[in-house]
Image: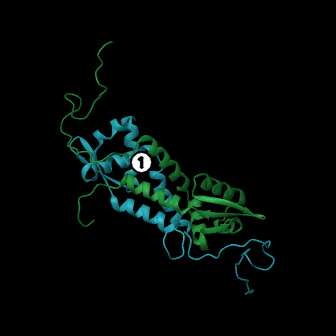
Chain colours: A green, B cyan
């Protein structure tokens, strides 16, 4: 077998690989990987829509974090099928759960999912700052 | 002038306006308005992309939350113009600042912007839970 060289391509600082002059701070922790970034982006896309943000907020504003679909269409000023589509996206993203009771569907916030989203965002993006007042 | 009736359309519980049987929890606080939702959605759209999340994370992973563009292209495995486009979106969203020094551009995280994003998300969507352990 032939001896193979390690797959190091254009590593910054490698001799001759990069122009000199760039003075970057060293990497101090592991950045977000491709798979984690894709998963986080999927959930963020589900909430990155004005109608869906308002739906989540409307559900959250109801006592117990639960609301009937019959109370969600009117405040949004959108058609019932459009509201149902947005609710479906939020359920598929795990941010709401859906419960059919009688003729109405009820939607409940999943606070852990929102906490996890906020936590993932903060954890992935928080700068490792020096100790002291922020 | 003619006497006008108040603009109450299909308010749940209004006589004859809604089918009976829906039992919704009352609204306990003001839900997110249309303008706030649009603004929050805009910022969320800026981060709801795997490449942009990885860029933010890479910048954050550098000491001091600053990185040279020359260190951001290689880890992403994308072309320089594509990376520059994503960085531009993040700068326009106020999540990064850009500083040209010599031949290189340096990008710095804006922690307040990320804090504000996380805070807006949490504030808009947090369910008003009963007091007690979460």
Q: Chain of mark 1?
A: B
Q: How many marks?
A: 1
Query: Is A73 above or below relative to A33?
Result: below
Q: Which residue position holds label 1?
A: B53
State the residue in front, B76 or A108: A108
Using residue B45 as the reference point, say whether residue A74 is left or right of it: right
Label 1 SS:
helix
Using residue B13 as the reference point, say whether residue A25 is left or right of it: left
Which quadrant holds the N terminus of chain B?
Answer: bottom right
Query: Is A47 above or below relative to B103?
Result: below
Identity of the residue drawn at 48% across and 72% down: B133
Query: Is A62 above or below relative to A118?
Result: below
State the residue in front, A58 or A21: A58
Disc 1: CA contacts within 10 A as few (<14), some (14-19) or many (>=20)? many
Q: Position of residue A128 (x, y in %)?
A: 29, 55
Q: Position of residue A55 (x, y in %)?
A: 60, 63
Quarter of the image where one finds residue A50:
bottom right
Q: Position of residue B57 (x, y in %)?
A: 36, 48
* Direction top: furthest residue: A1
Q: Position of residue A52 (x, y in %)?
A: 58, 59
Identity of the residue drawn at 73% across and 83% down: B5
Using residue B129 as the reference point, say whether residue A100 is left or right of it: right
Quarter of the image where one finds residue B77:
top left
Identity of the residue drawn at 31% across and 13% down: A2
Quarter of the image where one finds residue A76:
bottom right
Query: Is A17 above or below relative to A80?
Result: above
State the residue in front, B80 or A61: A61
């Amino acid at each position: 077998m032939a001896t193979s060289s390690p797959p190091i391509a254009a590593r910054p600082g490698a001799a001759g690989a990069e122009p000199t002059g760039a003075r970057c701070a060293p990497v101090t922790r592991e950045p977000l990987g491709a798979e984690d970034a894709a998963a986080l982006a999927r959930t963020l896309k589900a909430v990155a829509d004005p109608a869906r943000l308002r739906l989540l907020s409307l559900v959250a504003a109801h006592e117990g974090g639960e609301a009937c679909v019959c109370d969600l269409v009117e405040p949004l000023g959108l058609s019932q099928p459009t509201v149902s589509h947005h609710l479906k996206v939020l359920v598929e993203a795990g941010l709401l759960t859906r419960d059919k009771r009688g003729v109405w569907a009820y939607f409940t916030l999943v606070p852990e999912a929102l906490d996890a989203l906020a936590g993932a965002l903060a954890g992935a993006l928080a700068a490792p700052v020096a100790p002291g007042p922020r």
